[in-house]
Image (cartoon, helix red, strand yellow):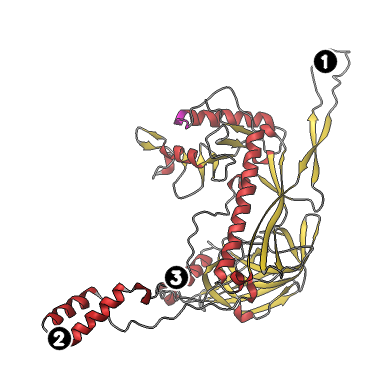
Amino acid sequence: MITFSAELKADAAERTISGKIVPYDGEVGMTSAGAVVFERRAINIAESSNVKLLLEHDPKQPIGRAQFFNETEDGIYASFKISKSSRGTDALIEAAEELRTGLSVGVMVNAAKPKNGVLYVSSAELLEVSLVQAAAFKSAAVTDIAASEDEVAEPTQPTESETVVEETTAVEATPTVEAAAVEAARPAVTAMAYSKPRIELTAAKYAEQSIRAALGDEDARQYLVAADSTVNNPGLVPTRQLSEIINPLGTTIRPSIEAITRGVLPDAGMTFEIPKITAMPAVAEIAQGNAFQDTDMTSDFLSVTVKKYAGQQTFSVELLDRTSPAFFDELVRNMGAAYAKATDAAVNAAIITGASLDATTTVTYPTAAELLGVVARGAASVYNATLGLSNPFARNMIVNTSQWSNIMTLNDAGRPIYTASQPQNAGGAVTPTALQGNVAGLNLYVTPNTASGTDTDGSILIVNPDAYTWYESPTYRLRAETTATGQVTIGYYGYGAIATKVGAGAFKNNKA
């Protein structure tokens, strides 16, 4: 499955959102699978009325349903009727105020071919469309919003919608095997029905019937017998299970990767090379009549190793066929989270390995003055190491969660330095509700995916993002069935390479 964003319009009179969802003409978009181009007539829409509009690819947040699709020479256009739920009304408002300005589609790839780092998709099935904050393709933007003023002013309460099966955060595209449309064929799932209790069992009713029984009321006595039987035999009372799944373990964030530059992995080979200048020509003051300074510029190649990040789970066909689709959705989501953690931890470890440090040490959790010292010395060190790059300045800071916690405690006579409610005089912006912020002029990225859980050197990193680049392929999902054992194996994998272009383009704290 692959997701990318395109152009949309929201209409304020008819509660519709419409626009271009897929561009043609060779336009390249940076999608969840990397660089992608969709060829003309590549996307098949089996039943347009069944296509739902989701919010940010969250299957638990449907906001509308497709009205029509129109395929032209430059792409596919669509219009969606937005529900009268409060969520749908909020979505219309956000689109009208340009807070969410893109349409993003999720497709199941049937046929694709990589070329020069770009995945060219020739056949795919449309699964869903989502309203998102920004479009991946430059030609994508909201073009029409329709919602009456009365409907916006008085939104109705949302109703329970049917279970949404498709999860679009995973990517399915395999150059060697046909992608299996596992989720698309899922049947609708409805909640189990239970009959109403034969008696009204409440504390007030029970107390009332106890009094009546004491006064000789036979009906009340029979009520107490039935009530006591129900209470003392809990197996007779059904236990409902919600469709909600609690998962406090997995996250797909990759702060260390977000803090550096990104690149598309070459389409072949397990290593690749990048030319690098190793010595500069010299110019010096020369006395009249003397020979010129003679120092040659030299170069070499930086060799970058491509690594595979992969995982799988094996389970019975009964578990796949006879359980809620939520099981498969959550499995794929967790595989994506595990992939994100492994790749982000690898990048974090590479930056720590390449980063420089000076002789000035700090305590495990620096004071406000020590933190500013790390920023100041790190900025100067990074500039001196990367002054030949187009932008030689340190711009980002990566910290682990323990250092994030420490930064929020820093204060001046009790006044928070980085969490001020009136930020005009604050030293930055670091809050408990966001993993990004600003510290002393640097963009802050907080990562839980550190290679080590301890506070070692490198728990604070000052980084020039151009000094490190993460090259990544699309991620793939494979399904294999073994008839002999009746098992299904789901594999999730991708390829990535971290290029340390200038190791000293990062600076780490030196813990005493």
Q: Amino acid at mark 2?
A: Asp
Return the x and y of residue 157 as percentages of the image width and height.
41, 74
- Mark nearest the camera among 1 and 3 is 3
Q: Is residue 1 visible?
A: no
Task: State the residue position of label 1.
Answer: 286
10 Å crowding of disc 2: few (<14), some (14-19), many (20+): few
Return the x and y of residue 296 as percentages of the image width and height.
85, 26
Q: In the figure, 384 relative to 434: above or below?
A: above
Q: Which residue is at 68% across, 71% downward?
A: 181
- Mark nearest the camera among 1 and 2 is 2
Look at the image and tell me in which quarter the N terminus lies. Answer: bottom right
Residue contact between numbered discs 2 and 3, judged by CB atoms under 8 Å? no
Q: In terms of image quadrants, where is residue 500?
A: top right
Q: Amino acid at mark 3?
A: Gln
Task: State the residue position of label 3.
Answer: 241
Q: Point out the tag, 1 or 2, that comes first from the N-terminus.
A: 2
Q: In the figure, 477 relative to 78: above or below?
A: above
Chief SS of the magenta region: loop
CA separation in Å, label 2 and label 3: 38 Å
Task: State the residue position of label 2.
Answer: 217
Q: In screen coordinates, is 163 left or right of 316? A: left
Return the x and y of residue 250 as percentages of the image width and height.
54, 54
Q: Which residue is at 61% across, 81% downward?
A: 49
- What segment carries the magenta color? 365-369
Q: Amino acid at mark 1?
A: Ile
Asked if residue 368 lies in the magenta stretch, the reply is yes
- Secondary structure category for the residue under label 2: loop
